[in-house]
Image (tube, helix red, strand yellow):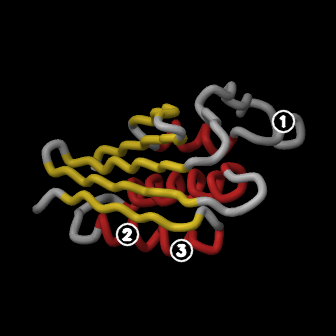
Amino acid sequence: MAEINNSLVLDAATDNLQQVMSFIEDCLKDRDISPKTEMHINMSVEEIFVNIAHYAYTEKTGKATINVSVTDDPAAITIIFKDSGIPYDPLAKKDPDVTLSAKERKIGGLGIYLVKKMMDEVVYKYENGQNVLIIKKHL
């Protein structure tokens, strides 16, 4: 199977979430991946893109770039999210205490915590005036 590298640039708006999900689905078509792995990828992509849409840009909508690389050896997908919004490292936040009930737990942080648990690698960096969040999942 051929390795793929695709890129999508669009407005960081929740209205574009379905386009992002379709893009990821297209990148994974013809790949034999488990439903659990597919669910982990989809949930992570949704969480990250919605966070960019809601929080990266204060006044108006900016752009988000999503780069996808799918490799055969090793079989993996790497997804790179870039935005030029407010610098923010979601990995710097302390993980929520999941032993507490939902009522006792502080709001926020659960989504990125789940991304860290579902993906094999999650890396954040700020470079060239952009937030760059890289997630990787072995297929």
Whole-percent x and y of residue 97? Answer: 73, 28
- Circle 2 is placed at which residue position? 25
Number of marks: 3
Q: Residue furthest front?
A: 128
- Circle 1 is placed at which residue position? 106
Relative to 85, 106 lies left or right: right
- Label 1 – label 2 distance at C-alpha: 33 Å
Task: Compare marks 1 and 3 and give the one earlier in the sequence.
Answer: 3
Task: Compare marks 3 and 2 and give the one earlier in the sequence.
Answer: 3
Whole-percent x and y of residue 41? Answer: 44, 54
Task: Determine whether label 1 and label 3 are within 8 Å by CB.
Answer: no
Task: Determine whether label 3 and label 2 are within 8 Å by CB.
Answer: no
Relative to 88, 100 lies left or right: right
Query: Residue placed at 25% from the left, 57% from the top?
Result: 5
- Circle 3 is placed at which residue position? 18
Residue 77's place in the image compared with 95, above or below, is: below
Tag 3: amino acid: Gln
- Label 1 – label 3 distance at C-alpha: 29 Å
Relative to 106, 49 lies left or right: left
Tag 2: amino acid: Glu
The local secondary structure at tag 3 comes to helix
The local secondary structure at tag 1 comes to loop
Label 1: how many Cα within 10 Å (few below 14, some 14–19, many 20+): few
- Which circle, 1 or 3, is nearer the viewer? 3
Query: Residue placed at 65% from the left, 52% from the top?
Result: 51
Which mark is on residue 87? none
Question: Within the image, what quadrant is residue 102 found in?
Answer: top right
Tag 1: amino acid: Lys
Query: Residue placed at 63% from the left, 47% from the top?
Result: 85
Q: Between 60 and 42, which is closer to the camera in this rendering?
A: 60
Question: Within the image, what quadrant is residue 107 found in?
Answer: top right
